[in-house]
């Protein structure tokens, strides 16, 4: 089997009306960035829908067909609709999402929602009261049975809520 046979049976067999849009997805502590190659697609032919946990990208394009041509290699899909749905594990801020199309590359910035942004909790080692209380709880927990521990935890939570 030669290279042209492989292309005809593999890559060229993607002749459907819909195809999955390949994307690159990057993440950092501030949010996500999605990049997709959409050559030949104009911005008015792109649809981007977003909610707190998901993104849908839809690109419609026209594909030229030359019925009289005898193709040696035909790698590009004949799909007229490229679509991709992504789900995120953290909430994003739909109002802050931005998209840009430049030189056939679609870039979408998806910032995390304020409540989803992780923060580092500082540890104050100079506060002996907190350290002593934590150590005492550890000692108590080690000596308690499960029903007693559950009752104490519930009482501690109720007392915390009341104060």
Image: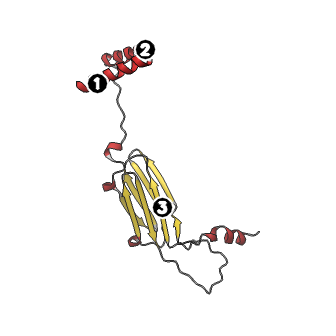
Residue drawn at (45%, 57%) of the image: 34
Residue drawn at (48%, 54%) of the image: 25
Q: Earlier in the sequence, mark 3 or mark 2?
A: 3
Residue drawn at (37%, 18%) of the image: 134
Q: Give above or below for 156 relative to 70.
A: above
Mark 1 sits on what residue?
158
Q: Is residue 37 shown to the viewer in this render?
A: no
- Which residue is most to the right? 1
Mark 3 sits on what residue?
84
Residue drawn at (63%, 68%) of the image: 11
Name the quadrant of the N terminus: bottom right
- Which residue is most to the bottom? 68
Within the image, what quadrant is residue 45 found in? bottom left
For the residues labelled 1 and 2, say whether their Cβ atoms are less than 8 Å apart: no
Cα–Cα gap, marks 1 and 3: 47 Å
Give SS at disc 3: strand
Residue 144 disc label = 2
Give SS at disc 2: loop
Q: x and y percent of residue 135 in the render? A: 39, 15
């Amino acid at each position: 089997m030669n290279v042209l046979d492989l292309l005809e049976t593999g890559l060229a067999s993607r002749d459907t009306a819909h195809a999955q849009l390949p994307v690159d997805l990057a993440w950092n502590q501030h949010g996500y960035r999605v990049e997709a190659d959409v050559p030949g697609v104009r911005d008015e032919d792109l649809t981007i829908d977003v909610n707190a946990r998901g993104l849908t990208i839809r690109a419609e394009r026209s594909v030229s067909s030359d019925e009289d041509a005898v193709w040696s290699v035909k790698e590009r899909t004949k799909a007229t609709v490229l679509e991709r749905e992504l789900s995120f594990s953290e909430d994003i801020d739909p109002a802050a999402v931005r998209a840009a199309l430049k030189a056939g590359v679609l870039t979408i910035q998806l910032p995390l929602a304020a409540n989803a942004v992780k923060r580092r909790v500082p540890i104050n080692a100079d506060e002996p009261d907190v350290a002593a209380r934590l150590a005492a709880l550890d000692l108590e927990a080690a000596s308690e049975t499960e029903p007693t521990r559950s009752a104490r935890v519930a009482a501690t939570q109720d007392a915390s809520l009341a104060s």
